[in-house]
Image (spheres, rainbow, N blue to C red):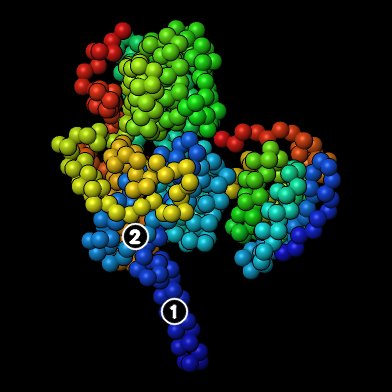
């Protein structure tokens, strides 16, 4: 897998993941991903359009970053996943914790919305 | 060609053996995974359930294990928070490679984990005996992945509503946690009142994580305005005790009932301490519904066994789960030696041990569901027998009612004292 930082502005962090996100490819990307998102104390837009495959280790990478972000009252929006990836995310009900969006401008708007109480 | 077939045959045999090895777990250990609150204002629930379960597993391991296999209970802290519960579950499945999941605590946590069980259905991940009476794990599409021992919140709240209405108390208000747990209990009250042609007369909520020190005066005011005959509280012990304290201080003196999840002893401890400080009895007119018999009743065989095994229990809560400010809680593994939650954990472990025994010396995940469903009329030592049906994933149905007498919860034998 690869991670590319697209934008780090005053309002949010925009990062893109690509390739296969599984046990063989993750290396220390999960740590780098969480560090990048949480050190900035900003909401995050995670572009998943380049992700070909995501195993449970990828789900853990996303949820591991979501917890400290929620503690900072900053949300995470997942942008443009391929249908097979979106199916996994929705089956795992991750869309209830981190919204899935296919339009960048809408994703930006979502980062401004207050976090819902996760119950 | 023959050599090729032989190689294929050897590879096939190795695959089967590796499969069996993976199922039975390395070193004759059956690793099982738990995620629960071991920190935060609901931490007593996790510790008590863990110790009740682990005491029985220690007893089993000390007696030679199950078909030669030892049980290892791996517990992670989720702080009663859904996101860590999801993370813990993925870690237990992937890193710890547990054989099954057991003893999860809480509705908001368990309901977020259920989709993962469905997602990984081809990996036969089952959750046993969660400490929640909510409906989602009792209904499709998740019921096939979860086995419950305890009755549901619908059954607990229905029982309370029936008892109150029989006692002439038909104006019932609800105080509840603003999340999936609270709504589940609220819905149970609403449904049962509906059967009697009644409605909830007043309701007030609080945010999950509120502590005993919080003020619940606003909620008391809202509920008082509805002039109820009784209040049913669907909360955790710190908030529920805080509400009871403020209700009594505010002149709301009708019976207040709690459901089993509250953590009865922890709630009672807070009220007794507050009563001592203020020279007032905050334990009057309290009713708690429970899903196990009273642990003080030594006429029950499982209670005697529970106390006997707990008295020999030496394992401590894993060091990773002990926090600096927990020193007064678990220097010896438990704040209270006995309790409703610990007893429930003990019964959970007892039944799970029977399931694992029936799975044989090489337990196979793919046979878990059919093995549980084979349990019918099993005597767990509490009088009521445990049975699972093809379309029913809940083993017990009896709800017990207790009230406080001389600083302890005792069974209610006569409801006339609660008559309006």
Residues beneath discs 1 and 2 located on the same chain: yes
Which quarter of the rendered picture does the C terminus of chain B lie within? Answer: top left
- The answer to whether B380 appears left or right of A12 in the picture is left
The answer to whether the residues at label 1 and label 2 have Cβ atoms under 8 Å apart is no
| Residue matched to label 1 | B14
Q: How far from the left and from the top, in percent, is residue B403?
A: 28, 23
Disc 2: host chain: B
- Asked if B228 appears above or below B305 in the picture, the reply is above
Front position in the image: B150 or B7: B150
Residue B44, quarter of the rendered image: top left
- The answer to whether B271 appears left or right of B375 in the picture is right
Q: Residue at x 56, y 51 (%)?
A: B87
Q: Residue at x 45, y 21 (%)?
A: B243
For the residues carrying marks 1 and 2, which lies nearer the camera in this image? 2
Q: Residue at x 23, y 13 (%)?
A: B416
Residue A117 visible: yes
- Asked if B274 appears above or below B227 in the picture, the reply is below
| Residue matched to label 2 | B71
In the drawing, what numbered circle is on residue B68?
none
Q: Residue at x 37, y 12 (%)?
A: B254
- Asked if B169 appears above or below B214 in the picture, the reply is above
- State the separation of the CA atoms marked 1 and 2: 25 Å
Residue B186 visible: no
């Amino acid at each position: 897998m690869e991670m590319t930082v697209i934008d780090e502005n005053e309002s949010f962090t925009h990062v893109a993941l690509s390739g296969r996100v599984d046990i063989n490819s993750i290396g220390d990307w999960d740590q780098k991903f969480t560090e990048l998102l949480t050190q900035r104390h900003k909401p995050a837009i995670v572009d998943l359009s380049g992700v070909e495959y995501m195993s449970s280790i990828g789900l853990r990478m996303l949820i591991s970053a979501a917890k400290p972000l929620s503690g900072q009252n900053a949300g995470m929006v997942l942008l443009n996943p391929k249908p097979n990836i979106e199916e996994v995310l929705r089956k795992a009900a991750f869309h209830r914790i981190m919204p899935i969006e296919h339009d960048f401008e809408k994703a930006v708007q979502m980062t401004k919305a207050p976090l819902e109480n996760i119950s | 060609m023959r050599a090729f077939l032989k190689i294929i045959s050897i590879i096939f045999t190795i695959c089967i053996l590796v499969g069996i090895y993976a199922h039975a777990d390395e070193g004759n250990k059956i690793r099982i995974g738990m995620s629960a609150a071991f920190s935060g204002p609901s931490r007593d629930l996790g510790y008590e359930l863990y110790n009740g379960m682990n005491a029985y597993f220690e007893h089993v391991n000390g007696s030679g294990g199950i078909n030669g296999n030892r049980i290892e209970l791996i517990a992670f802290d989720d702080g009663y928070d859904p996101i860590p519960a999801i993370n813990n579950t993925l870690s237990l499945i992937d890193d710890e490679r547990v054989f099954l999941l057991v003893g999860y605590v809480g509705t908001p946590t368990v309901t977020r984990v259920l989709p993962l069980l469905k997602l990984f259905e081809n990996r036969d991940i089952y959750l046993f005996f969660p400490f929640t009476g909510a409906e989602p794990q009792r209904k499709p599409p998740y019921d096939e992945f979860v086995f419950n021992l305890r009755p549901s919140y619908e059954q607990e709240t229905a029982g309370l509503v029936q008892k109150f209405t029989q006692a002439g108390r038909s104006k019932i208000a609800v105080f509840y946690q603003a999340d999936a747990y609270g709504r589940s209990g609220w819905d149970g009250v609403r449904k049962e009142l509906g059967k009697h042609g009644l409605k909830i007369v007043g309701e007030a909520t609080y945010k999950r994580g509120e502590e005993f020190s919080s003020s619940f005066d606003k909620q008391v005011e809202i509920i008082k305005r509805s002039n109820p005959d009784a209040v049913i509280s669907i909360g955790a012990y710190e908030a529920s005790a805080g509400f009871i304290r403020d209700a009594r201080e505010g002149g709301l003196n009708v019976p207040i009932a709690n459901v089993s999840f509250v953590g009865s002893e922890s709630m009672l401890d807070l009220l007794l301490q507050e009563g001592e400080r203020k020279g007032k009895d905050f334990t009057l007119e309290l009713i708690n519904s429970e899903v196990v018999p009273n642990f003080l009743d030594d006429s029950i065989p499982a209670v005697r066994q529970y106390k006997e095994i707990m008295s020999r229990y030496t394992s401590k809560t894993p060091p990773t789960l002990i926090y600096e400010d927990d020193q007064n809680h678990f220097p010896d593994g438990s704040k209270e030696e006995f309790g409703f939650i610990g007893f429930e954990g003990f019964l959970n472990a007892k039944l799970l041990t029977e399931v694992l025994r029936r799975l044989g010396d090489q337990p196979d995940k793919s046979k878990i569901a059919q093995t549980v469903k084979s349990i019918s009329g099993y005597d767990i030592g509490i009088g009521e027998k445990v049975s699972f049906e093809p379309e029913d994933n809940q083993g017990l149905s009896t709800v017990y009612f207790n009230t406080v007498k001389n600083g302890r919860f005792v069974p209610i034998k006569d409801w006339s004292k609660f008559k309006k």
